[in-house]
Amino acid sequence: MHQIIIIGSGPAGFTAAIYAARAGLKPVLFASSVAIGGELMNTTEVENFPGFPEGIQGPDLMQKMQEQAERFGTEVVYDDVVEVDFSGAVKRLTAGDGTVHEARTVIYATGSAYRKLGLPDEDRLSGHGVSWCATCDGFFFREKTIAVVGGGDSAMEEATFLTRFADKVYVIHRREELKASKIMQQRAFDNEKIEFVWNAEIAGIQGESQVTGVTLRSTVDGAESELALDGLFIAIGNDPRTHLVHGKLDLTADGTVAVEGRSSRTSSRGVFAAGDVVDPTYRQAITAAASGTVAALDAEHYLAAIDDHAEPEIVELDRVEVEALVER
Ligand SMILES: Cc1cc2nc3c(=O)[nH]c(=O)nc-3n(C[C@H](O)[C@H](O)[C@H](O)COP(=O)(O)OP(=O)(O)OC[C@H]3O[C@@H](n4cnc5c(N)ncnc54)[C@H](O)[C@@H]3O)c2cc1C
């Protein structure tokens, strides 16, 4: 049986692994079978992760995190966890190849997925003008013409934020009214750099190595038109990857895994959660990494508290008692 299994290979998972491995817990990290390295694998330049003054490519940063985790003894498994059983003191995880793995603690760090438009060129131009994160990429669009797709609060927030850099920001929305709160709408309406394109959806994205424009399709009569752009920000929602733990861990109203206060403790004893899967607000590599640290330390303290007590008591300890032990 393992001391700790980590599910997820983004900044949260690998940072948790670095801490757990350095604490001698010999973590096993399930990295996924296809999307190893998390969301930063979909981007190019990362300029806001401390320690890289010249910036670093997203995949290079993730490679370094993995190397650092492995250097201290993390075992990385290139498979998905497809089922979890958190009901007992021993957690049981089933991998994609059918094997069952047991652990005393689990760190759930599966991230979240930005909703996509589903267009063929969207992934190809990701990091080359197509973005899902204004905080991450707005800086690259100084004095450019860009568009934000979406009609909710986050689309309004992103559009307003992007006017700090871009000369012109179109907001493209399928309907002729917004879902966003009145205050967010008004802020966008009052901003003279923002122009709304109503009743339109994106039918195609153009550009060989960089976005050059989009094809718009009217949702009223289907008429198509071209719009020249340097960048396209997609702000149509974000889904925390919680499908594995529905009915097994409490979730918040935002759909993220619920954790207690500033800790990573979930509703299931011995299961900790970290990164974007617990974060409806910040969703940055550095906040995910920090959250991975919290989870590893919480797991370490939990194990230490349990190991300080005789075996029969372990099973009898309820959540409050374990927390009291962890506090000490
Ligand atoms: C295009 C883009 C550009 C970005 N640029 C920046 C930037 O410049 N700076 C910045 O700070 N942030 C940036 N971000 C945000 C940043 O990538 C995320 O905040 C961060 O990656 C979240 O880390 P995480 O570890 O929580 O999750 P993720 O990075 O999403 O990693 C989770 C991992 O878990 C794996 N996983 C999920 N389910 C399972 C399972 N059942 N079994 C095994 N593995 C599983 C996933 O495949 C994934 O690899 C960007 C995001 C995007 C999409």
Image (cartoon, rainbow, N blue to C red):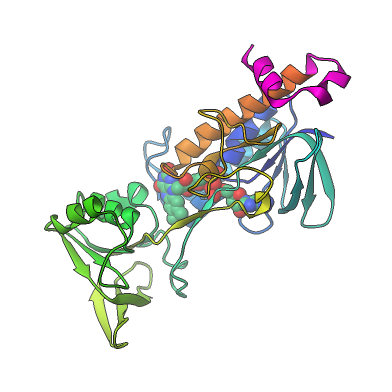
In the rendered structure, the answer to whether residue 224 lies left or right of residue 308 reads left
Which residue is found at the position 32% from the left and 81% from the top? 219
Q: Give the camera-side residue of 87 and 212.
A: 87
Q: Image quarter for residue 19? A: top right
Which residue is found at the position 39% from the left and 42% from the top? 55
Residue 312 part of the magenta-drawn span? yes
Q: Position of residue 71 (x, y in %)?
A: 67, 33
Q: Position of residue 82 (x, y in %)?
A: 73, 55
Q: Give the camera-side residue of 35 and 234.
A: 234
Q: Which residues are magenta?
A: 307-328
Which residue is found at the position 69% from the left and 15% from the top? 325
- For the stretch drawn in magenta, the main secondary structure is helix
Q: Which quadrant, please, contains the N terminus?
A: top right
Q: Which quadrant, please, contains the C terminus?
A: top right
Which residue is found at the position 42% from the left and 38% from the top? 49
Residue 29 part of the magenta-drawn span? no
Residue 177 visible in the snapshot: yes
* Total labels drawn: 0
Q: Image quarter for residue 91? A: top right
Q: Residue furthest top?
A: 328
Q: Image quarter for residue 22? A: top right
Q: Is residue 67 above or below residue 191?
A: above
Q: Position of residue 303 (x, y in %)?
A: 73, 23
Q: Give the camera-side residue of 26 and 264.
A: 264
Q: Position of residue 30 (x, y in %)?
A: 70, 46
